Image (cartoon, rainbow, N blue to C red):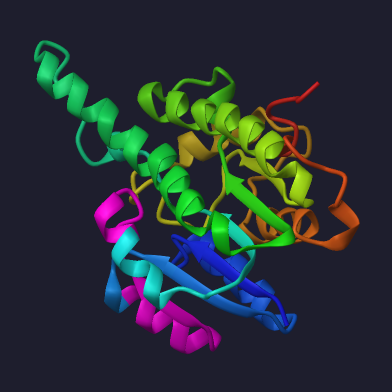
Amino acid sequence: MREIVVTGGGTGIGAAVAAAFAAHGDRVTITGRREQVLKETAGRLGVSHVAFNAANPVAVGEALERLPDRVDVLVNNAGGNTNLDRAPDGDDLMDVAESWWANLNANLMSAVLVTSALTPRLADGGRIVTIGSIAARGTGSGSYGAAKAAVEAWTADLAAELGPRGVTANVVSPGLVVDTEFFRGRLTEEGVRRRVESTRNGRPGTPDDVTATVRFLASPEARHITGQVVHVNGGAYLGR
């Protein structure tokens, strides 16, 4: 039985990933900041949960004793566009800086810190899959896109660092995915239509689309795939 850790596992893509691993007999631990959300999701899925802020190094260190002693698959899903909560005031440099730090912390540092903390526990031949975004490929989103681009660069180094142990590190990069909390209820029908028009298959993505790719990269069959960005966006961005 494999040990799976999924950060940001309380809702959306993270919850779907956790559900898929659990359904196939793996032992899963989900993490996130919201204790009650995690508790409800963990109870529904029959998995374990550990609440902590993945972007806080002290909190990550304190959470280690509650996380599995061995990790076969780590899915870094925690993150989101923090600018959706508060757009920065472009005339206030401190406000601009804080807004960039927020997205870098939520999307890059959360993955870096949890991965660094769990690397000694990663089984040889283990898997690290980090959720990126189409925003990293020049589709906008400012500091959020920049943070996800940094995730790709960091993953390339991680693949080289851990490759001798047979550990792979890859990014799954979704486009528009419905049925998540990402847009905080602010995505309009026009926004969906515009994004769907840019796809080749004429539909938005779903958490299950992303989950299937994550599970493949975590499988024995994907042992020679590492340092890659796998785009799951219906062709809205062509990774070629």
Report the residue at 25% width, 55% height from top: 58
Q: Position of residue 48 (x, y in %)?
A: 47, 82
**Would you identify the image quadrant in which residue 174 lies?**
top right
Q: Which residues are magenta?
A: 37-60
Q: Is residue 148 above or below residue 116?
A: above
Q: Locate residue 144 relative to residue 58 in the image: left or right.
A: right
Residue 187 visible in this rendered orientation of the protein: no
Residue 224 visible in this rendered orientation of the protein: yes
Question: In the depicted view, which residue is nearer to us: 97 or 208?
Answer: 97
Query: So how many labels did they put on this image?
Result: 0
Q: Locate residue 56 relative to residue 38 in the image: left or right.
A: left
Q: Position of residue 30 (x, y in %)?
A: 47, 71
**Would you identify the image quadrant in which residue 209 lies?**
bottom right
Q: Is residue 44 above or below residue 34?
A: below
Q: Quadrant of the C terminus?
A: top right
Q: Locate residue 75 relative to residue 141 in the image: left or right.
A: right
Q: Locate residue 232 relative to residue 87 in the image: left or right.
A: right
Q: Is residue 179 inside the magenta stretch?
A: no
